[in-house]
Image: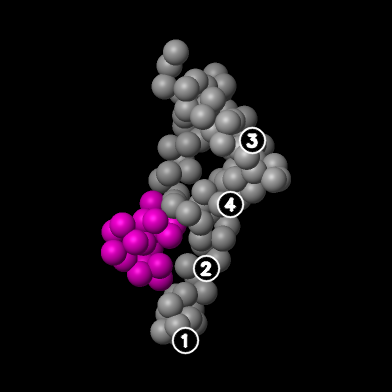
Amino acid sequence: MSFALQYERLVVWLVGFCPAPDKFAHMCAGLGIWLAAGLFLRRSLASVVPLLVVVAAEVANECVDRVAHGGWMWHDTLADAASTWFWPAVLFLALRRYRWLRAAA
């Protein structure tokens, strides 16, 4: 069995534990990757680097999905990307914009 199909089975299994559709899992994964990247790389969450890690991880995930499904499913791909990137991007922008948030963090 190929890596893409094994990865797809793992993702389906993990999403099965979520109380909501797979977009909820994408949101949680995006936030988790963003926080883990900040901690692991020892960067502030106001830095663009943890956000770029989230973007790269989601792009890689969608490329594996493309291989597993045999083609792009653009509606699903774009919705997954938006779900994954939305909250890390909003929080990143808030931390960049509002200095008092950075001081509190």
Which residue: 44% across, 57% down?
Answer: 34
- In percent of width and height, residue 73 lies at 62, 30
Q: Quadrant of the N terminus?
A: top left
Q: Return the disc, 1 or 2, that comes first in the chain's sequence.
A: 2
45 within the magenta span: yes
Q: Quadrant of the C terminus?
A: bottom left
Q: Which residue is mark 4?
A: 27
Magenta stretch in the rendered image: 34-53
Q: Which mark is residue 91?
A: 2
Which residue: 38% across, 51% down?
Answer: 53
Q: Is residue 100 above or below residue 16?
A: below
Q: Is residue 82 above or below residue 100?
A: above
Q: Amino acid at mark 2?
A: Leu
User: Do we see residue 52 in this rendering?
Assistant: no
- The answer to whether the residues at label 1 and label 4 have Cβ atoms under 8 Å apart is no
52 and 11: which is toward the camera: 11
Which residue: 51% across, 56% down?
Answer: 31
- CA separation, marks 1 and 2? 13 Å
Q: Which mark is residue 67?
A: none
Q: How is the image coloured?
A: one colour
What kind of element bears circle 1? helix
Q: Which residue is mark 1?
A: 100
Answer with left or right where residue 36 lies relative to residue 42.
Answer: right
Q: Amino acid at mark 1?
A: Trp
- In percent of width and height, residue 52 lies at 39, 54
Q: Return the disc, 1 or 3, that comes first in the chain's sequence.
A: 3
Q: Amino acid at mark 4?
A: Met
- In percent of width and height, residue 24 lies at 64, 48
What kind of element bears circle 3? loop
Q: Quadrant of residue 11?
A: top right
